[in-house]
Image (cartoon, helix red, strand yellow):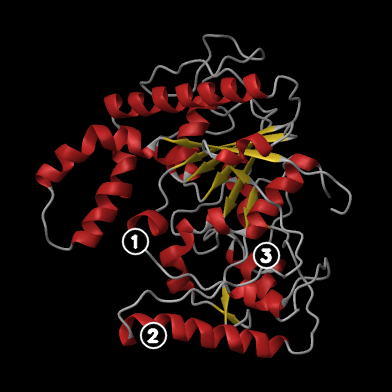
């Protein structure tokens, strides 16, 4: 927003390495060498759910995450003693279940100390702060609660903590949450996350610039084949002019000193991102190509046909897709909780990416999604 100061401090919380330091050697002793890629995915990611569901490993994860939350908060308040902004927890994937359990098992003034709907055989340490927002990203929270036969109307964090379930439409691990709070919402679509940019206009010579970048990219890819030297780099200028929110990805970096009195604090519950840590990959940013064409400008007009189709796809299997069969909510929720992101598009944003191909990477796409980051900033800053 022009003239509005936005300063968001981002603190990563890592628990994936903690549990795998305890388990990897034992898992490697029993893992076959065939189909190594699939076995790596299974051991590094799918097994985390089994670790958390076990008594000893689950307790270790709860203790580590709560302690790390408290240590990060204490360091932040030591560095910024006058901080009075909002605090949000971004909880990714299984981290959303872990965070829900931690927050749901904190003492609450509106409930007797003996009241519990946890059904979990864990001891929950005290969390030294209460977040204002809790964002679940690609989080199978409702599926876990269903497996554990827990009702989120009874087993939930303090109601003053605003919870939002944000998901990619093709993320195979994502589920709706609102129907667990009100069954009528199985007939309602999720809320479409507002785009960080919108309307298209043209600009002279933009196509020529995109063509030149394509040629440079091809030359970069061919250089290792035709020459033994180091391939040249072809930097792409960041001249799109978009008002993209910038989050401080500070993890002990030298840039920490440049942050003056942050307005808001984000504590991110995350694991190692598979795409970036397990293999080197080339990413072509189609949205950047669109901005180079001068086609991307803000708009809040009516939804496109693609968006309408996307929203219809978020109605659950048991929901009534046709408008004529929908049931009016007798007791609507105070706030919407389910939010869906736009799927990626290819070829300068003109073609929708195949749903099944998108599903292979959707679960790992949240940390680079501009619409998601802008949505979170809007919540923290109260921007309508």
Residue 143 percent location from the top left of the image: 45, 45
Q: Nearer the viewer, residue 192 or 361?
A: 361
Give the CA distance from mark 2 to mark 3: 56 Å
Give the CA distance from mark 3 to mark 1: 47 Å
Q: Is residue 196 above or below residue 179?
A: below
Residue in view at x 65 percent, y 52 percent = 373
The answer to whether 227 appears left or right of 37 in the picture is right
Q: CB of mark 2 within 8 Å of CB of mark 1? A: no
- Quick one: SS at disc 3? helix
Q: Earlier in the sequence, mark 2 or mark 1?
A: 2
Q: Which residue is mark 3?
A: 325
Residue 244 percent location from the top left of the image: 72, 58
Residue farthest top in this picture: 113
- Quick one: SS at disc 2? helix
Q: Is residue 364 above or below residue 78?
A: below
Q: Which residue is mark 2?
A: 222
Which numbered disc covers residue 355? none
Q: Earlier in the sequence, mark 2 or mark 3?
A: 2
Residue in view at x 72 percent, y 70 percent = 240
User: Is residue 167 among the parts visible in the rendering?
Assistant: yes
The answer to whether 109 appears left or right of 116 in the picture is right
Q: Residues within 10 Å of mark 3 (few under 14, many from 20)?
A: few
Residue 157 percent location from the top left of the image: 59, 27
Q: Residues within 10 Å of mark 2 (few under 14, many from 20)?
A: few
Residue in view at x 25 percent, y 54 percent = 40
Q: Which residue is mark 1?
A: 279
The answer to whether 66 appears left or right of 245 in the picture is left
Q: Is residue 12 above or below residue 345?
A: above
Q: Residues within 10 Å of mark 1 (few under 14, many from 20)?
A: few
Q: CB of mark 3 within 8 Å of CB of mark 1? A: no
Q: Earlier in the sequence, mark 3 or mark 1?
A: 1
- Quick one: SS at disc 1? loop
């Amino acid at each position: 927003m022009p003239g509005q100061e936005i300063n968001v401090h981002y603190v990563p919380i890592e628990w994936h390495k903690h549990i795998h330091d305890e388990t990897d050697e034992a898992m490697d002793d029993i893992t076959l060498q065939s189909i190594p890629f699939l076995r790596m995915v299974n051991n590094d990611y799918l097994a985390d759910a089994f670790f958390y569901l076990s008594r000893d490993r689950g307790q270790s994860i709860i203790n580590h995450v709560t302690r790390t939350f408290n240590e990060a908060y204490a360091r932040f308040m030591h560095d910024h003693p006058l901080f009075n902004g909002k605090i949000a927890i971004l909880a990714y994937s299984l981290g959303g279940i872990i965070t829900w359990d931690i927050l749901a098992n904190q003492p609450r003034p509106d409930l007797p100390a003996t009241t519990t709907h946890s059904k979990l055989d864990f001891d929950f340490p005290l969390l030294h702060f209460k977040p204002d927002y809790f964002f679940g990203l690609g989080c199978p929270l409702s599926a876990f609660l269903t497996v554990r036969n827990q009702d989120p109307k009874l087993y939930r964090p303090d109601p003053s903590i605003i919870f939002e379930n944000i998901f990619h439409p093709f993320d195979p691990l994502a589920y709706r949450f609102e129907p667990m709070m009100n069954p009528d919402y199985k007939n309602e679509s999720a809320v479409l996350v507002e785009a960080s940019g919108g309307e298209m206009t043209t600009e002279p010579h933009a196509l020529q610039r995109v063509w030149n970048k394509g040629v440079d990219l091809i030359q970069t890819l061919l250089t290792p084949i035709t020459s033994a030297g180091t391939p040249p780099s072809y930097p792409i200028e960041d001249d799109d002019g978009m008002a993209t929110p910038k989050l401080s990805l500070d993890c002990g970096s030298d840039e920490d000193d440049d942050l003056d009195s942050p307005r808001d604090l984000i504590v991110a519950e995350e694991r190692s991102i598979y795409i970036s840590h397990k293999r080197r990959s080339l990413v072509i940013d189609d949205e950047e190509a669109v901005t180079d064409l001068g086609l991307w400008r803000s708009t809040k007009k009516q939804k496109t046909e693609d968006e309408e189709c996307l929203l219809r796809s978020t109605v659950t299997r048991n929901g009534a897709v046709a408008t004529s069969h929908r049931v009016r909510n007798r007791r609507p929720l105070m706030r919407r909780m389910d939010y869906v992101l736009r799927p990626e598009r290819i070829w300068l944003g003109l073609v929708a990416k195949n749903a099944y191909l998108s599903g292979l990477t959707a679960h790992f796409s949240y940390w680079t999604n501009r619409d998601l980051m802008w949505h979170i900033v809007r919540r923290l800053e109260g921007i309508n």
